[in-house]
């Protein structure tokens, strides 16, 4: 599924972190790279890869929320945070099964707002999200607490 997104993507940046704190700190560098809004990115990686941790770091960097106040939207599906300049939407589609359910979330309306940054965990499950996305951040385990991050944007 992710391979669909792989096509036509170019790597903008890659990072390695060695701890949860390292990923939180990296949110600042990543936030800069994802702006200017509006932007929609798929966060792609296994359970425990660090997708939510990265969003915590990004939210803090944008002045949208304290890292510890950002929790996984696994059950609520969407969390919204008002940042200094951007409106941050954090989605987790792990529990969603159909495009029909997805429609009720209003992802398109979120992404259309001029100041939106939309970060979607498990977005690669849905062709419509992949289609709409401006890029992805792929996160891979690199042994122990090491993680590799690949920021890729549509060419
Ligand atoms: P996901 O949202 O991808 O399922 P989370 O961010 O919720 O993942 O969880 C990542 C887990 O991995 C946390 O328990 C965190 O403490 C741990 N961890 C270990 N090393 C790292 C790292 N380098 N970056 C991010 N998380 C890490
Ligand atoms: Mg998560």
Image: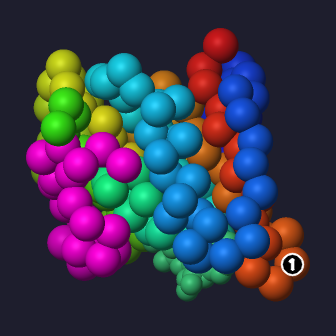
14 inside magenta stretch = no
Residue 46, position as x, y percentages in the image: 65, 71
> Looking at this rendering, what residue extends furthest in the bottom direction?
144
| Magenta stretch in the rendered image | 61-83
Q: Which residue is drawn at 66% across and 32% down?
A: 152
Q: Does residue 50 lie above or below 39 as drawn?
A: below
- Pick the residue in front: 149 or 62: 62
User: Label 1's element?
Assistant: loop
* Residue 73 visible here: no
> Looking at this rendering, what residue extends furthest in the right direction?
143
> Looking at this rendering, what residue extends furthest in the top direction?
155
- State which quarter of the image contains the C terminus: top right
- Pick the residue in front: 134 or 83: 83
Q: In this view, does 133 lie to the left or right of 144?
A: left
75 inside magenta stretch = yes
- The image quadrant in which ligand 1 is located: bottom right
- Pick the residue in front: 108 or 151: 151
Residue 95, position as x, y percentages in the image: 36, 73
Can you identify the residue that label 1 sits on? Answer: 143
């Amino acid at each position: 599924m992710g391979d669909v997104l792989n096509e036509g993507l170019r790597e903008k940046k890659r990072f390695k972190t060695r701890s949860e704190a390292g990923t939180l700190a990296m949110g600042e560098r990543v936030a800069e790279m994802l702006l200017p809004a509006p932007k929609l990115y798929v966060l792609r990686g296994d359970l425990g890869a660090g997708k939510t941790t990265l969003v915590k770091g990004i939210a803090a960097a944008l002045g949208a929320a304290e890292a510890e106040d950002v929790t996984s939207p696994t059950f609520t599906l969407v969390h919204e945070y008002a940042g200094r300049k951007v409106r941050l939407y954090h989605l987790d589609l792990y529990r969603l099964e159909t495009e029909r359910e997805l429609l009720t979330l209003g992802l398109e309306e979120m992404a259309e707002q001029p100041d939106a940054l939309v970060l979607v965990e498990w977005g690669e499950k849905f062709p419509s999200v992949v289609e709409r996305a401006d890029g992805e951040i792929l996160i891979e385990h690199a042994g122990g607490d090491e993680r590799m991050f690949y920021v890729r944007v549509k060419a």
